[in-house]
Image: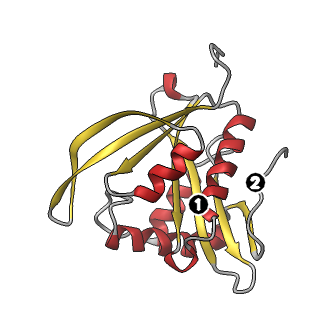
């Protein structure tokens, strides 16, 4: 399978499976209800998460990080299609969510490393991240991994009664000029 990110002791990362969807859903729905990390405003059902997982493939994986002592999903990350248009097939969007009880342990960085390694292994060319204003930890994480700020979309989302800017970051993971 190639190089893998190294996770902190007590945590194990693998490609997400059906049995981890409830934990993934719990973490995501917490973000929906409490943060601007996602612009979804309604929580997701287990059926919606099943369809979401089914839409991911080998080039666009979902990884789940489990806490070994409890077996609970502590974090997850995914590469999703940037667009359904064929010309964008070599570009993916990065998503990372960490359960608040497991934050500040390096899981986000390990997941981002795992996603970058997976993108390279699968022959993707470009990774994109959309980061809502005020998310200093995510901004720092992406910059640490070499993502480049390419623009700010002003007031494109409205959540919790206020308009929010979104910064766009990119990281080239494929060879320059490679063909699909």
Q: Residue furthest bottom?
A: 70
Decide if residue 134 is in sight here: yes
Q: Position of residue 32 (x, y in %)?
A: 35, 67
Q: Position of residue 10 (x, y in %)?
A: 76, 77
Quadrant of the rendered image containing residue 89: top right
Residue hosting label 1: 108
Q: Is residue 24 above or below residue 179?
A: below
Q: Residue furthest left?
A: 161
Residue hosting label 2: 5
Q: CA distance from mark 1 to mark 2?
A: 11 Å
In the rendering, which numbered label is found on residue 90?
A: none
10 sits left or right of 164 in the view: right
In the image, what residue occupies the spot 64% across and 80% down?
72
Q: Position of residue 30 (x, y in %)?
A: 41, 74
Decide if residue 44 is in sight here: no
Point out the image quarter for the C terminus: top right
Q: Earlier in the sequence, mark 1 or mark 2?
A: 2
Q: Position of residue 66 (x, y in %)?
A: 69, 73
Name the foreground residue: 148 vs 54.
148
166 sits left or right of 62 in the view: left
């Amino acid at each position: 399978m190639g190089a893998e990110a190294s996770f902190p002791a007590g945590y194990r990362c693998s490609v997400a499976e059906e049995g981890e969807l409830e934990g993934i859903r719990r973490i995501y729905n917490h973000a929906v209800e409490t943060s601007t990390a996602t612009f979804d405003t309604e929580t997701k059902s287990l059926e919606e998460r099943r369809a979401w997982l089914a839409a991911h493939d080998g080039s666009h994986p979902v990884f789940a990080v489990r806490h070994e002592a409890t077996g609970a999903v502590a974090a997850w990350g995914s590469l999703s299609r940037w667009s359904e248009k064929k010309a964008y097939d070599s570009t993916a969007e990065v998503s990372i969510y960490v359960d608040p009880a497991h934050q500040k342990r390096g899981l986000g960085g390990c997941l981002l490393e795992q996603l970058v390694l997976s993108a390279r292994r699968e022959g993707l060319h470009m990774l994109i991240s959309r980061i809502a204003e005020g998310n200093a930890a995510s901004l720092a994480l992406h910059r640490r991994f070499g993502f480049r700020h390419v623009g700010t979309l002003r007031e494109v989302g409205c959540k919790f009664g206020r308009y929010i800017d979104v910064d766009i970051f990119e990281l080239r993971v494929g060879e320059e000029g490679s063909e699909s």
